[in-house]
Amino acid sequence: MKNKILIIIGREFNERVRKKSFIITTLLTPLLMIGLMLTPMLVMNITDSEQKNIVVVDDSGIVAQKLQSNDEVGFEPLLVNINDARKQFTEHFAILHIGENIMTNHRDVRLYTNSSASIGLEMSIASQIENIIEGEKLKRYNIENLPQILDEIETDVTLQSFKNEVAPDEGEKSSSSIVATVIAYILSFILYMFLLIYGAMVMQSVIEEKNNRVLEVMVSSVRPFQMMLGKILGVASVAVVQVVIWGVLVFGVAFFAIPLIIPDDMSNAMSMMQQGASPETLSAAANVELLQAVTALTDPIYISKIIIGLLLFVVGGFLLYAAMFAAVGSAVDNAQDAQQLQTPITLPIILALIVMLSVINDPTSNIAFWFSMIPFTSPIVMMARIPYDIPIWEIAVSVTLLYATFVATVWLASKIYRVGILMHGKKPTFKELWKWMRYKY
């Protein structure tokens, strides 16, 4: 039995690994992920938008002269009627009307645009007006040297985050919520794509072999359960190879590429931060948030934990869903008929992705904990929690439940598989699938 399963695993593995598409996606996916992270920042830095001219009609006489123009927007205060301004200045980007009672009615502000305005521009204008009104209100208290006092009390707090692990000889372990959040997003979407793409790959493979009557020939020498298990494990081994390759690339970037591009002063600041240095002792130019992010990305224990977790949940999640996709593929004759039957399978995956957004806001909440324990949602949800350094026992329990559920699912799916692969010309209903699972062999 083992030899037959190994032959099927080898066949499925070789068929996919030798394809050019596998090599290309394996090497390009990490680069694509990095590109998706860096592109928005590059676009924001490269984009050189023209200054937008805005005519300001200020009926209150308080705000207009205090508005500050910048590279994004230029303010042009004018003493005109708002209705005349809207008709006359149609070539300007917009007309900003500030009502006479702006000090008491903060909604008495309108922006009439002659083209589309971005939400960032609107927030920037509103922020300036808010600061001006707040300053005018403070002046009513007749406080001497008010601008100087405001400058002196303005405070920029730099928060350093450390894991509360009492190990004086090893220093303090820095953590970065920014890095954890970014990694959680990336890992969750990787699991989402793996479960859907590779699960659908198993289903499509079963449908093709069923239509080609290959399974009818194989069933004479191999039991249906062996065929299904071999196919699932074969495709799973492909996923494992991809994760391992990605892990090697991540380790290479983290421990060889990043240290080479880090300036010496930042490297020294990172060492001081790991030893518990206060912000005052760091370089004045040091960005503490950036230091924490780079420190986390170059921590071998942190990176190893993430890669091991990714490997466990990619394999476990795929095995669980591949068994169900294989059962669906065996029950139908074409991909169109499979759409209805695979809907109950894809819903938990989509639900897990939605819950992931809540997990990132609070990785220790009850909804985050329980959805990371439910096997059908745990692969995605737990991978969103692992970057936040959750307790090891939670990961262990989640992995145990996931693989135990896979065993039970394979047993049930194999009952559908052994009946479905020999059925042709009829689309089964959910009631018939339930009947197939209750057959005794």
Image (cartoon, rainbow, N blue to C red):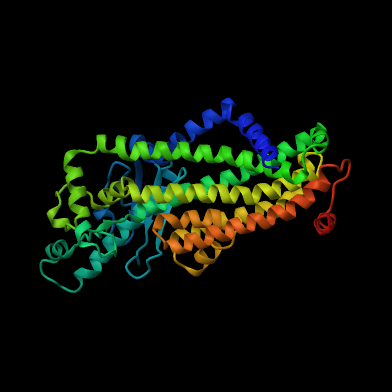
Give the residue at x 35% y 50%. 301
Q: Which of 292 and 26 is in front in this view?
A: 26
Residue 35, position as x, y percentages in the image: 42, 36
Which residue is situated farthest in the bottom direction here? 141
Q: In this view, does 26 lie above or below 159?
A: above
Q: Quadrant of the C terminus?
A: bottom right
Q: In this view, does 209 lie to the left or right of 64?
A: right
Residue 95 appears in the rendering: no
Q: In this view, does 356 lie to the left or right of 320?
A: left
Residue 286, position as x, y percentages in the image: 19, 48
Residue 204, position as x, y percentages in the image: 71, 38
Q: In which quarter of the image is the N terminus?
A: top right
Give the residue at x 71% y 36%. 205
The quadrant in which residue 46 appears is top left
Q: Nearer the viewer, residue 231 or 180?
A: 231
Q: Nearer the viewer, residue 400 or 66?
A: 400
Give the residue at x 68% y 36%. 8
Residue 195, position as x, y percentages in the image: 60, 46
Q: Is residue 372 above or below residue 220?
A: below
Residue 38 appears in the rendering: yes
